[in-house]
């Protein structure tokens, strides 16, 4: 296998891995090898590790692993924050050494070294700002303000006292067990910033995603241009290579494969960083797009989860009631069967039909596209002033 084939296989396998991780759990893949591999990655391997630790070290090993898992995954910790900083610094250092130090090229001025540094510094500053920003912590001082902003919808939130904070939870707030606090308009706990995303810092979080996406796109475009400049400088297109299939020397010209092979051989680190930037840009686009869609609909990540859960539970209750009332054992048995080991497509079709059994109450918090975005950008301006 040559370098180009290895590169394609590597990128393909990495893409497949990310796809399985993101979508392996969806009902569509239930009972298929995709869901099995997802289980293996997310649970199977870890269950194996626990089993081996138990066999070798006994209860002590299991208890040590439990404590480590609790500290790393369920409590607030800076592991991913450190990982982000390391990735940013190391990637910039290697990119500078491999690509930027070659500047200038015709059409690519040397000031890109400074704009690249400024872009990385901006991302770093936004990252620190997002990590340090207050998501909208509910305290005695802020309780009244946050409580007056929305009303309870009794689907995603209801009038309830938080057992830990001993405060009445304002509508749309939630207690984060990792950070041990109630957060207004709670969106999600983000391990990358080791904090929550909520009412006050969603705008910071969106800026953080946007900056990183732009940095990846800039790095990709600049990298492609620099490799192009290096190809010209070394007059690679005028070179010839031996093609065994044609049994003769062939001029490289604009053939993609020999050009890529040359780039991989000369700048393997830089090209690897570009592959990483490409994958990161793709994931960032999906993530940012999803959050912008939520903002446009006036919804939070937590609310989408809660509403889905509400509908699942209400549908199941309606099925059970209908089955009891009409003696239709089928309904319940089909449901039990469908949540079991049936194939993805059957489950999918059945799920679509089931949704029609119960209609979920309308979402109360959307006030129109402009108003929804305004609320995120200027969270402390009262709603009444927007309309
Ligand atoms: Zn949290
Ligand atoms: Zn709380």
Image (tube, grey):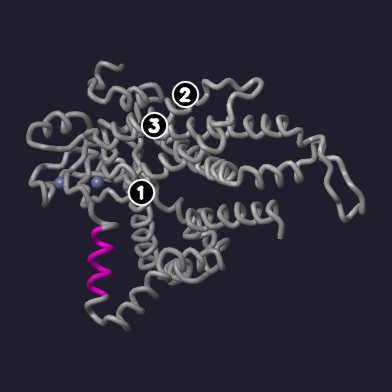
Q: Is the residue at mark 2 in contact range of ligand 1, meaning its CB lies under 8 Å from it? A: no
Residue 387 in magenta stretch: no
Q: Which of the two residues, 209 or 288, is positioned nearer the viewer here?
A: 209
Vertical order, 124 against 382 (above or below): below
Q: Are marks 3 and 1 in contact (CB under 8 Å)?
A: no
| Kind of element beneath mark 3 | helix
State left or right for residue 356 relative to residue 251: left
Real-space Cα separation, disc 2 to disc 3, in angstroms = 14 Å
Q: Nearer the viewer, mark 2 or mark 1?
A: 2
| Quadrant of the image occupied by residue 296 | top left
Q: What span is colored magenta in the figure?
A: 62-71
Real-space Cα separation, disc 3 to disc 1, in angstroms = 30 Å
Label placed on residue 123: 3
Crowdedness near tag 3: few (<14), some (14–19) or many (≥20) residues, C-alpha within 10 Å: many
| Quadrant of the image occupied by residue 197 | top left
Residue 38: percent from the left, percent from the top? 48, 63
Residue 54: percent from the left, percent from the top? 30, 80
Residue 84: percent from the left, percent from the top? 37, 44
Q: Nearer the viewer, mark 3 or mark 1?
A: 3
Looking at the image, which residue is at 48% across and 53% down?
Answer: 22
| Among numbered discs 2 and 3, the one appearing first in the sequence | 2
Vertical order, 129 against 106 (above or below): below
Looking at the image, which residue is at 39% across and 31% down?
Answer: 123
Label placed on residue 114: 2
| Among numbered discs 3 and 1, the one appearing first in the sequence | 3
Real-space Cα separation, disc 2 to disc 1, in angstroms = 43 Å
Mark 1 lies on residue: 305
Residue 335: percent from the left, percent from the top? 44, 66
State left or right for residue 381 relative to residue 83: left
| Kind of element beneath mark 2 | helix
Crowdedness near tag 1: few (<14), some (14–19) or many (≥20) residues, C-alpha within 10 Å: few
| Kind of element beneath mark 1 | helix
């Amino acid at each position: 296998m040559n370098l180009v084939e290895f590169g394609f296989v590597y990128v393909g396998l990495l893409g497949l891995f990310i796809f399985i991780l993101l979508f392996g759990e969806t009902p569509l893949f239930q009972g298929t090898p995709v869901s099995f591999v997802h289980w293996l990655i997310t649970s199977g391997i870890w269950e194996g590790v626990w089993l081996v630790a138990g066999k070798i070290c006994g209860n002590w090993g299991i208890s040590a692993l439990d404590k480590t898992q609790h500290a790393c995954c369920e409590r607030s910790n800076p592991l991913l924050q450190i990982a982000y900083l390391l990735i940013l610094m190391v990637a910039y250092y290697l990119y500078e050494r491999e690509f930027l130090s070659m500047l200038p090229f015709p059409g690519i001025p040397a000031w890109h070294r400074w704009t690249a540094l400024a872009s990385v510094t901006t991302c770093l500053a936004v990252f620190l700002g997002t990590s340090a920003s207050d998501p909208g912590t509910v305290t005695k001082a802020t309780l009244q303000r946050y409580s007056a902003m929305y009303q309870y919808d009794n689907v995603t939130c209801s009038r309830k006292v938080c057992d830990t904070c001993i405060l009445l939870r304002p509508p749309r707030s939630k207690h984060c067990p990792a950070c041990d606090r109630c957060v207004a308009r709670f969106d999600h706990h983000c391990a990358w910033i080791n904090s929550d995303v909520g009412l006050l810092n969603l705008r910071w979080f969106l800026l953080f995603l946007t900056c990183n996406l732009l940095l990846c796109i800039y790095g990709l475009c600049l990298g492609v241009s620099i490799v192009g400049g290096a190809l010209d400088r070394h007059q690679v297109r005028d070179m010839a290579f031996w093609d065994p299939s044609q049994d003769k020397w062939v001029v490289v010209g604009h053939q993609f494969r020999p050009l890529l092979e040359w780039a991989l051989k000369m700048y393997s680190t830089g090209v690897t960083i570009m592959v990483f930037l490409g994958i990161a840009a793709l994931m960032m686009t999906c993530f940012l797009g999803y959050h912008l869609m939520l903002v446009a609909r006036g919804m939070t990540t937590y609310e989408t989860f809660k509403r889905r859960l509400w509908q699942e539970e209400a549908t199941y209750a309606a099925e059970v009631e209908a089955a009891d009332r009409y003696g239709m054992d089928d309904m319940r048995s089909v449901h039990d069967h469908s949540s079991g080991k049936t194939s993805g497509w059957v489950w999918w079709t059945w799920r679509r039909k089931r949704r029609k059994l119960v209609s979920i109450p309308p979402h109360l918090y959307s006030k129109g596209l402009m108003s929804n975005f305004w609320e995120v950008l200027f969270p402390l301006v009262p709603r009444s002033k927007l309309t």
